[in-house]
């Protein structure tokens, strides 16, 4: 009789462990899906990029890098034109080329509204073409300006990225 009780106890423990394992698997699968970022930049300078710094200043030693950013934390979207008004500058002192993603966070889902092409050091963008605005409603959203850094010479992805919290206004 005691042997049967031990077997039943072991079965209950195994059943509990299996249930916990299934819950963990479901949780991990339902987590926010990451943004697929290429290992090499396209090599195409963004059509909206405007050269502003005419003198590139190298404030770093060979083999190291320097990143500077200037940006606005409120971005205005014109849904009809599928474009965003923003200010993003990659100053001439930067060693990286940058690509920018405009993202709205909706619960567990990241909605990528658009992405710039390469913004080299010394360039700024004031407009971004958007691909994914059809389902947006007029109003305000919390968003992210995700910056992805690439080596200015080889276009290989650098080890750092950043996410800047912004406000997005859809008009």
Image (spheres, grey):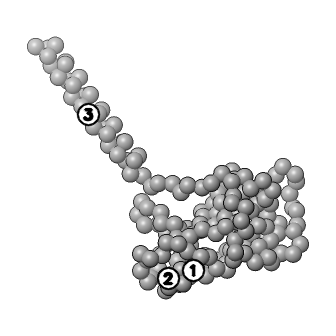
Q: Secondary structure at mark 1?
A: strand
Instruction: Point out residue 13 in the picture as x, y percentages from the top left corner.
Output: 25, 28
- Between residue 29 and residue 47, name the one nearer to us: 47
How far apart in space, not on screen, are marks 3 and 1 (Cα)? 52 Å
Instruction: Name which residue lies at 10% across and 13% down.
Output: 1
- Between residue 78 and residue 62, name the one nearer to us: 78
Instruction: Name which residue lies at 49% across and 72% down.
Output: 132
Q: Nearer the viewer, mark 3 or mark 1?
A: 1
Instruction: Name which residue lies at 47% across and 54% down.
Output: 33
Tell me, for residue 79, which label it has, or none.
2
Instruction: Point out residue 148 in the picture as x, y percentages from the top left corner.
Output: 65, 60
Instruction: Name which residue lies at 23% across and 23% down.
Output: 10
Q: In the displayed structure, does residue 64 sit left or right of residue 15?
A: right
- Between residue 42 and residue 89, name the one nearer to us: 42
Q: In the displayed structure, does residue 62 sit left or right of residue 146?
A: right
Label 1: few (<14), some (14–19) or many (≥20) C-alpha neighbours in 10 Å:
some
Residue beneath label 3, please?
16
Q: In the displayed structure, does residue 66 sit left or right of residue 32?
A: right
How far apart in space, not on screen, are marks 3 and 2 (Cα)? 51 Å
Confirm whether residue 149 shows in the render.
no
Residue 120 lies in what quarter of the image? bottom right
Tell me, for residue 83, which label it has, or none.
1
């Amino acid at each position: 009789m005691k042997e049967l009780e031990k077997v039943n106890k072991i079965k209950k423990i195994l059943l509990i462990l299996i249930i916990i394992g299934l819950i963990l698997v479901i949780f991990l699968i339902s987590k926010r899906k990451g943004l697929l970022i290429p290992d090499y930049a396209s090599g195409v300078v963004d059509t909206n990029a405007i050269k502003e710094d005419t003198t590139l200043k190298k404030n770093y030693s060979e083999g190291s890098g320097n990143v500077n950013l200037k940006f606005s934390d409120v971005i205005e979207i014109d849904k009809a034109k599928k474009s965003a008004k923003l200010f993003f500058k990659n100053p001439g002192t930067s060693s990286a080329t940058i690509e920018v993603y405009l993202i709205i966070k909706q619960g567990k889902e990241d909605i990528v509204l658009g992405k710039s092409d390469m913004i080299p050091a010394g360039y700024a963008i004031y407009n971004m073409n958007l691909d994914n605005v059809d389902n947006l409603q007029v109003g305000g959203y919390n968003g992210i300006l995700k910056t992805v850094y690439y080596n200015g010479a080889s276009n290989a992805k650098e080890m750092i990225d950043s996410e800047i919290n912004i406000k997005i206004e859809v008009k």
